[in-house]
Amino acid sequence: MVSLETKRNLGPGVNGDASLLGTPAHDLAEVSARLGSASPPAVLDEIHQLRSKLEEAYATIDELRASRSGMEEDLHQLKRIASMDDLTGLWNRRFLVDSLDISYSFALRHQLSLSIVLFDVDHFKAFNDGYGHPAGDAVLREVASIVLNCARNHDVVARYGGEEFAVLLPGTGRSGAIAMADRVRRSLEERQWNLRPITASFGVATLRHCESEEAATAANLVEAADLAMYHSKRHGRNRVTHAEDVVCAVFMQPCTPESPADRRADAPPDSRLGDL
C-alpha cells in the first residue's frame, strides 16, 4: 500500500490511485511533474515496487487459472477412464445403465423411440477353455470392433459383462433395432476367424408407449432384452429375437397363457434378471 507520507506528498486528487499505478514506465516524467514538491526518487521507487507486486499477483492468478484448467481436464479424463472397459475400449456397464436411465426418461417424456440390444458370444467358455484366455480376449476385442463398425455415432456400445455386449439405440424402433442386431450377427458369422467360427445370440427390446407405461422402467427394458437373448440361445443360437415375440414388453409377462411356475421352470439358471 502507498504510505501515508507518500499520500500527503502526492497532494489532493492524486492520492496514489489506480490511474497512477497503471502509468507506463515511459510516462514517468509526467508522473514526476504531478508529484509537485514530493521527493520523486522515493515515490517513484515505491510506485515501481507496487507495480512489481501487482504484476506478480496477476502472474499468480494466471498460474492458478492454468492449474484449475489442468485439474478439470484431469478430472474429465478420470471420469472417462472410470466409464470405459479396459479390455475392449467400449463403455462399461455402469455407463450403459446411466445412459439408459437418461435416454429412457427422455424417450418417455417426448414419446420417442428407444431400443436396446443385448448379445452373448456363443460357447465362449468352451473357447476360453480350449484356446486360452489370451485368445478369448483377442476375440472380445475383435467383437467390440465389429459392433462399433455397425453402430451409429450416438449409439452407446458397451461391454455388459464377460462375453456379453449391449447397444443402446436412441431414436430407434423395433425394425431398426432388429436390423442393427442382425447386421452385427452377420458380420460375426461371415468374418474369417483364426481358430474357429464365432457367432452370437441376440435379444432386442423396444420401449412401447402405452397407457401402462408408468409401470415400466428402464430395468424392464433390459430384462425384456435379456429374456429375448436367452430365447435365441435356447432355439439354436446365432439368431436375433425381439422381446415382443416372446414377452409383453411393459410388464414382462409371457404372451402365452403359462403359469408362473412354468415360467420359473423355463428361466435359465444363470439369468441375470434383477441386476439392474
Image (cartoon, rainbow, N blue to C red):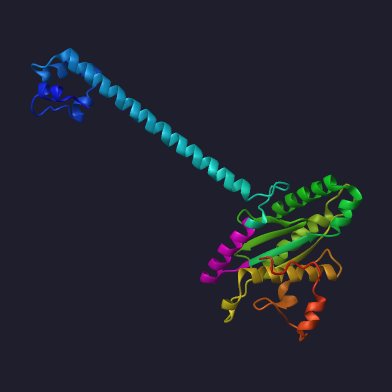
Residue 112 % position (x, y)? 56, 69
Residue 73 in percent (x, y) is at 52, 41
Quarter residue 271 falls in: bottom right
Give the residue furthest to the right.
Answer: 130
User: Residue at image x 65%, y 72%?
Assistant: 220
Q: Is residue 39 above or below residue 91?
A: above
Above or below 66: residue 175: below
Residue at 56% in and 77% down: 214
| Nearer to the camera, 146 or 8 | 8
Asked whether 80 or 45 is in front, the reply is 45
Q: Residue sitting at 22 percent across and 27 percent down?
A: 1
Please state the extent of the stretch shown in magenta in the rendering.
Answer: 95-114
Q: Quadrant of residue 178?
A: bottom right
Q: Residue at x 13, y 22 (%)?
A: 5
Q: Does 261 lie within the magenta span? A: no
* Lateral position of residue 11 relative to residue 70, left or right: left
Horizontal and vertical percent position of residue 8: 10, 24
Q: Is residue 260 above or below residue 127?
A: below
Q: Main secondary structure of the magenta part?
A: helix
Quadrant assignment, res 34: top left
Q: Position of residue 69 (x, y in %)?
A: 47, 39
Asked whether, in this view, residue 177 is left or right of residue 128, the answer is left
